[in-house]
Image (cartoon, rainbow, N blue to C red):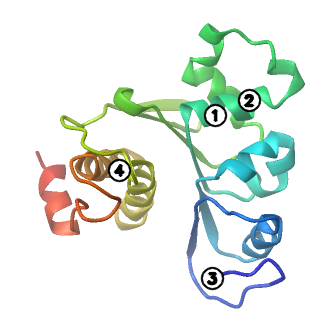
Amino acid sequence: NLKPETRSLKLKTNWFYVASLSGEGWRGVMDSITSTKSRIAWNPGNRQLAAGLNGLKKYLAKTAIFFVNKDEAIELVMSLPKYKKSGTAWLNQPKNLFGVLEKFCPGILVITDGAKGAYLYLRGKIHRQPSLSKKIVDTTGAGDSFCSSFLGGYIRYCGNVLKSLKLGAINSAKNLTGVGAQDPLLTWTAAEKLMRK
């Protein structure tokens, strides 16, 4: 566990995957992580989202891959006074959300959208990965399995974002077929068999 009072991390790792951080000291944890030379993939939690885009600005600037679901993306965009009164139709367009988020995060942006799949923004282009779920038993852990699988794929497939998107969709779809966050998850071998279909 990382402690908020830690000001510098001695860990030698290429990547940090950061999910929801609870407690008042989350900024200390993010300060520690962003002070390293490691790349960061970040899926923020409620406390971080409540800080708004301006409150997350210095961390987003150092984030290589940023994951949010569409509702979270809308919440972040609406944290800026300029967009508080934006209409539903405008806010429901991934291109508009990406247009705002890219001003804060120069890295890869990923927005998941439930049954509609996921969208990825990179270098001015939006890529869409349709959902692969056919059966939903329990949604627990589906977002985490998507994000962690995407990152695993991104590392394994040397930055191929389309393969990473598909791997995320495959593992999160499998996650939805069982109860809980871990039991239904696929092994690399099983996931890669499905990647070839």
Quadrant holding the C terminus: top left
Three-letter code for the amino acid on which mark 2 is drawn:
Val
Reading the image, the residue beneath label 1 is 73
Say what amino acid the circle numbered 1 marks. Answer: Ala
Badges 4 and 2: C-beta atoms under 8 Å apart?
no
Q: Nearer the viewer, mark 3 or mark 4?
A: 3
Q: Which residue is mark 2?
A: 77
Please give the name of the residue rendered at 59% of the width and 31% of the height, measured from the top-left corner: 71
SS label for mark 3: loop
Sequence-wise, the earlier of marks 2 and 3 is 3
Residue 132: where, in percent of width, then height?
Answer: 24, 37
Label located before the other in sequence (4 or 2): 2
Earlier sequence position, callout 3 versus callout 4: 3
Density class for disc 2 (Cα within 10 Å; few <14, some 14-19, many ≥20) is many
Q: Quadrant of residue 190?
A: bottom left
Q: Amino acid at mark 3?
A: Asn
Q: Secondary structure at mark 1?
A: helix
- Which label's residue is closer to the chain start, 3 or 1? 3
